[in-house]
Image (spheres, rainbow, N blue to C red):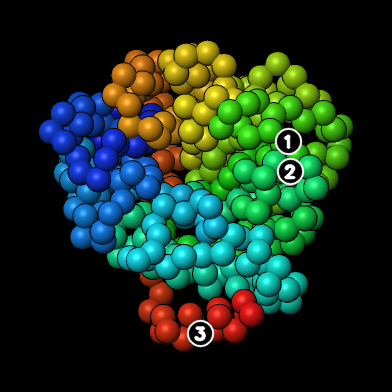
Amino acid sequence: MTPPVRSPAIFGCLGPRLDAEEAAFFRDVAPVGFILFARNVDTPAQVRRLCADLRDAVGWDAPIFIDQEGGRVQRLRAPHWREWLPPLEQAQRAGPDAAARAMYLRSLLIAREHAALGIDGNCAPCADIARPETHPFLRNRCYGTEARSVTLLARAVAEGLADAGVFAVLKHMPGHGRGTLDSHHDLPRVSVPRDLLEAEDFAPFRALSDLHWGMSAHLVYEAIDPDAPATLSATMIRLIREDIGFDGLLMTDDLSMNALPGTIGDRAAGARAAGCDVILHCNGERAEMEAVVGAAGALDPAASTRLARALGSRRAPLSVDEQALLSELADLSR
C-alpha cells in the first residue's frame, strides 16, 4: 500500500499532548512522519498516547522517530527509562574485541524501549569518525577514531535496532567528524582534499549504504562544493547517491539548525532541489512548519518509492531474555 503522504516532511510537535489545532494541521498536510523530543516525553503511558494520537491525526501507521544515542543525546531518561553511556565511552569501556557486541546489545535494548512505546525509528547509527578536532557537540556521540572500527560498530548498532523491529537512520551523511563548529549554531567548513575524504570520512557510509533511512550533514566540503552545505548541495547529494551508493530515503538533519542560511522556507526548497527526499523539522513551531509545507512541494515518485521500501524493511522483533542481555552488557562495560 502506498502511504497517504502529501508533504515530504517529518515534523515535531510542541508538547506532551497533541492539541486539536496541531492534529488538524497534521491531518491537512499529511507528512511522512514525526519525531519526538524531551519536551514530548513524560511517562510511558503519555508517550504511547501521544504516538497513537499522532497516527490518528494522519489516519495511518506513520513512522515516529526519536534521538536516543546515549549520553547527552537521549530523549527517554530515568526514572522511566534506562540511562546510557555516551557511545564513544561505551565502545572504549568494552575494548576493541567486545565493542561491537556491546554496541549491538545496547542498541537492541534501547530499541525494545522504543517499540514498547510505539516509536518506530532511532536516529542512529552515527557513522562519523571522531578526531581530535571534532567539536564536543559530536565527538563522544561517535563510535571510534578510524573508519574500520566506526563501520563495524555502526553496523552493530543498526543490527541491534533492526532486531527489535526499529528502523535505523544512518547519520550524518557523508560524514561530520571533521567539523570543528556546532552546526546547531554555526556552519562548519572542511578543507581537506577529496581523496582523503573518500578514503576515510565517506568509507563507513559507503559500507552502510544498504540501510534504508539516512540523514544529511549540515557542513561544507570545500574540495567538492565550497558554496553550499551538503544538505543544500546537489553536488553532495549526487555524491551520496552515486559515489557512496545510498539509495534509501534521505532526510535532512533538522532544518531549524543555524548552520543553514536563509529562511526556513528557503532551506526547505533548497534541500528538496538538491535531492533530499524528506525535510526534517523538529521544533513544532506552526509558522515554520507551514513554511516548510509551502516550500517543499510534494513527495516525488522516487522519494515515494524509497519511502515504501524503507517502511517495508522492518524486521519482526527477536524474542530475547532481556535480563540476560542487560547482564552481558554490564559485564562488557566494566
Residue 200 drawn at (x, y percent):
80, 46
Quadrant where the N terminus sits is top left
Callout 3 touching callout 2 (CB < 8 Å): no
Residue tagged 1: 180
Kindly tell me whether residue 178 is visible in this rendering: yes
Upstream in the sequence, badge 1 or badge 3? Answer: 1
Read off the residue under disc 3: 327
Q: Are marks 1 and 3 in contact (CB under 8 Å)?
A: no
Residue farthest along the left direction in this orientation: 20
User: Mark 2–mark 1 contact, CB under 8 Å?
Assistant: yes
Where residue 133 sits: x, y (%)?
78, 42
Amino acid at pointer 2: Thr
Provide the secondary structure element on which disc 1 rests: loop
Q: Is residue 136 shown left or right of residue 69? A: right
Q: Position of residue 66 (x, y in %)?
A: 41, 49
Q: Which mark is residue 153?
A: none
* Residue 143 image position (x, y, % from top left): 67, 58
Q: Secondary structure at mark 3?
A: helix
Give the quarter of the image for residue 173: top right
Q: Would you call the spot at circle 2 few (<14 residues within 10 Å), some (14-19), or many (20 or more)? A: many
Secondary structure of the residue carrying tag 2 is: loop
What residue did someone put label 2 on?
Answer: 134
**CA neighbours of label 3 inside 10 A, class few (<14), some (14 to 19), many (20+):** few
Q: Is residue 2 left or right of residue 110?
A: left
The amino acid beneath tag 1 is Thr
Earlier-in-chain disc, 2 versus 1: 2
Q: CA distance from mark 3 to mark 2?
A: 33 Å
Residue at point 38%, 45% (across, down): 37
Which residue sits at x=65%, y=25%?
187
